[in-house]
Image: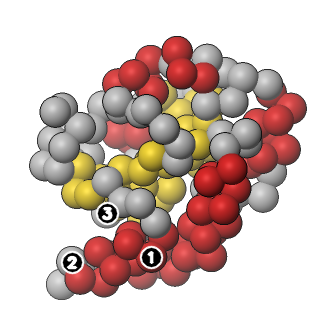
Amino acid sequence: RKMVNGQKAPDIQLYAGQNLYNLKNKFKLVVFGASWCQKCTEEIPKLAQFYQNWKDQYQLEVVFVSLDTQKQAYQDFIKNFQWISTCDFKSWDSPTVTDYCVFGTPTMYLLDANNNIQIKPISAEQISAWLELHQP
């Protein structure tokens, strides 16, 4: 119940000195996935198609949290990502995965500037529709 719309999402350590809460974007899309996830290999390229528009028009940043356990597989998977990516190589045992109640991949959360959950989208198209609907 802690990861429902309106609740504040947990912070995520991204890399040295940077975390999710430090990002000053109007929206943040947290995406949990992995190189071995077939659905991720289908959905993440769709996110990439929308990314620059989302960033420019809605001030949205994507944060990808990988459940990979192999460094090379992770690096190969994210090599073309234009957004922030992180991995602690602990897969399902990662504290971030537990904090976000992730039980499958991909799992996404769209957060506002205050890190409150707006929706738990299931597709890039749903994210675009929500952003368009909720822009002033």
* Residue closer to the observer: 1 or 81: 1
Dot in front, 1 or 3? 1
Question: Which corner quadrant of the image does residue 50 belong to?
Answer: bottom right
* Residue closer to the observer: 79 or 32: 32
The numbered mark, 1 or 3, whose residue comes first in the sequence reads: 3
Provide the residue designation for mark 3. Answer: 26
Q: CA distance from mark 1 to mark 2?
A: 14 Å
Circle 3 SS class: loop
Q: Is residue 79 above or below residue 55?
A: above
Provide the residue designation for mark 1. Answer: 125
Q: CA distance from mark 2 to mark 3?
A: 12 Å
Quarter of the image containing the N terminus? top left
* 84 relative position to 12: left or right: right
Q: Is residue 119 above or below residue 124?
A: above
* Residue positioned 38% across, 70% down in the render: 127
Report x, y in % for residue 44: 62, 60
Report x, y in % for residue 111: 30, 53
Report x, y in % for residue 92: 54, 21
**Mark 2: few, some, or many residues within 10 Å (few <14, many ≥20)?**
few
Circle 2 SS class: loop
Circle 1 SS class: helix
Provide the residue designation for mark 2. Answer: 134
* Residue positioned 86% across, 32% down in the render: 72
Q: Is residue 58 visible?
A: no
Report x, y in % for residue 43: 60, 62
Q: Is residue 49 above or below residue 102?
A: below
Residue type beneath disc 1: Glu
Pointers 1 and 3 in contact (C-beta within 8 Å): no
Q: CA distance from mark 1 to mark 3?
A: 19 Å
